[in-house]
């Protein structure tokens, strides 16, 4: 039978960090002295006498583990609360999860989420995901020709358009002497809803969304346009309407472009 180790001093009733010592845990005190303690969160746990002494001397934070992540981050690392990293601003340092330091951040788009602290500090996580989607969307329009065999077909005025319909509308604007910007910026409408209009007519201060047909006008796209119309002047044009601007049908224009080598005049 193993001999129970007895403490040299009685620590019952003493407080270490968030823990209050309840009793000497004789059933565990075989090779070293253990105490049963109660954390401020209400949970009971066992802790060795050596850890208590070490904690007292080094001023470490004692708890059942619920405060470990929060205070190990604050006491041993830089406190990054209210600091900005790329598109994220840290609003709270959270307890560890699976040995990972976690932080609560607010993105520039308004979304709030929980992320790994190291990923935020190192720049591996730059946003809630909106920035990545925006970059992907931009690269899709700018590099369409490089990423697909058919991409070069939609090139006009040094712009790679996403579709033949957009190219036709840009051609109409050029013939009409209307200055425009293609996909000028991304708007944050509400939580998790971002919108990039196709065209901005500079002199009219008006945005235009171009669609092939009502069938390609998805419910999500309709929601975006509806929300955007609350803050900006936006018009939706379909392929048939754009073709009429050229006094032809869309099928005639597409056939001429694809099979007759017709190209908009520069």
Image (cartoon, rainbow, N blue to C red):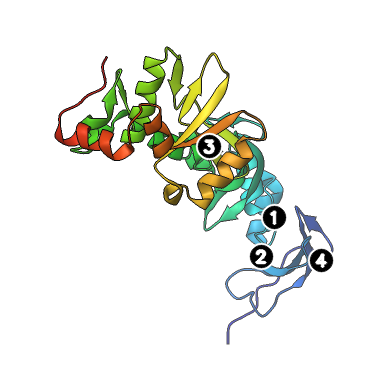
Q: Nearer the viewer, mark 2 or mark 3?
A: 3
Residue 112 appears in the figure: yes
Near-viewer residue (226 or 148): 226
List x then y, in percent, for residue 266: 27, 14
Q: Nearer the viewer, mark 1 or mark 4?
A: 1
Sequence order check, earlier mark of 3 and 1 = 1
Near-viewer residue (121 or 114): 114
Residue 180 lies in quadrant:
top left
Q: What whole-number distance in Å separates the C-alpha atoms at marks 1 and 2?
A: 9 Å
Residue for point 52% across, 49% down: 220
The disc label shown at residue 12, or none? 4
Residue at numbered disc 3: 195
Q: Nearer the viewer, mark 3 or mark 4?
A: 3
Q: Secondary structure at mark 4?
A: loop
Sequence order check, earlier mark of 4 and 2 = 4
Q: Nearer the viewer, mark 4 or mark 2?
A: 2
Furthest-left residue in view?
260
Q: Nearer the viewer, mark 1 or mark 2?
A: 1
* Disc 2 + disc 3, Cβ < 8 Å: no
* Disc 1 + disc 2, Cβ < 8 Å: yes
Q: Secondary structure at mark 1?
A: loop
Residue for point 58% across, 87% down: 1
The disc label shown at residue 62, or none? 1
Furthest-bottom residue in view?
1
Residue for point 42% across, 15% down: 176
Furthest-front residue in view?
247
Q: What whole-number distance in Å separates the C-alpha atoms at marks 2 and 3?
A: 55 Å
The disc label shown at residue 47, or none? 2
* Disc 3 + disc 4, Cβ < 8 Å: no
């Amino acid at each position: 039978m193993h001999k129970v180790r007895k403490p040299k001093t009685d620590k019952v009733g003493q407080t270490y960090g968030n823990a209050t010592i309840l009793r000497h845990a004789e059933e565990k005190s075989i090779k070293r002295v253990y105490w049963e303690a109660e954390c401020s969160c209400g949970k009971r746990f066992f802790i060795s006498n050596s850890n208590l002494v070490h904690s007292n001397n080094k001023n470490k934070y004692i708890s059942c583990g619920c405060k470990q992540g929060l205070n190990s981050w604050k006491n041993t690392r830089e406190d990054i609360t209210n600091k900005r990293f790329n598109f994220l601003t840290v609003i709270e340092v959270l307890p560890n999860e699976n040995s990972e330091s976690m932080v609560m951040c607010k993105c520039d788009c308004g979304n709030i989420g929980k992320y790994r602290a190291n990923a935020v500090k190192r720049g591996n996580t730059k946003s809630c995901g909106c920035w990545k989607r925006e970059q992907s969307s931009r690269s899709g329009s700018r590099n369409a020709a490089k990423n697909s065999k058919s991409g070069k077909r939609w090139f006009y005025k040094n712009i790679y358009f996403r579709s033949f319909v957009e190219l036709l509308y840009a051609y109409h604007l050029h013939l009409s002497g209307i200055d425009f910007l293609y996909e000028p910026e991304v708007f944050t409408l509400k939580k998790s809803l971002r919108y990039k209009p196709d065209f901005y007519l500079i002199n009219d201060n008006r945005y235009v969304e171009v669609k092939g047909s009502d069938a390609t006008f998805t419910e999500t796209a309709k929601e975006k346009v509806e929300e955007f119309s609350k803050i900006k002047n936006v018009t939706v044009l379909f392929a048939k309407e754009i073709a009429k601007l050229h006094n032809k049908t869309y099928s005639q224009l597409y056939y001429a472009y694809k099979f007759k080598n017709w190209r908009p005049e520069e």
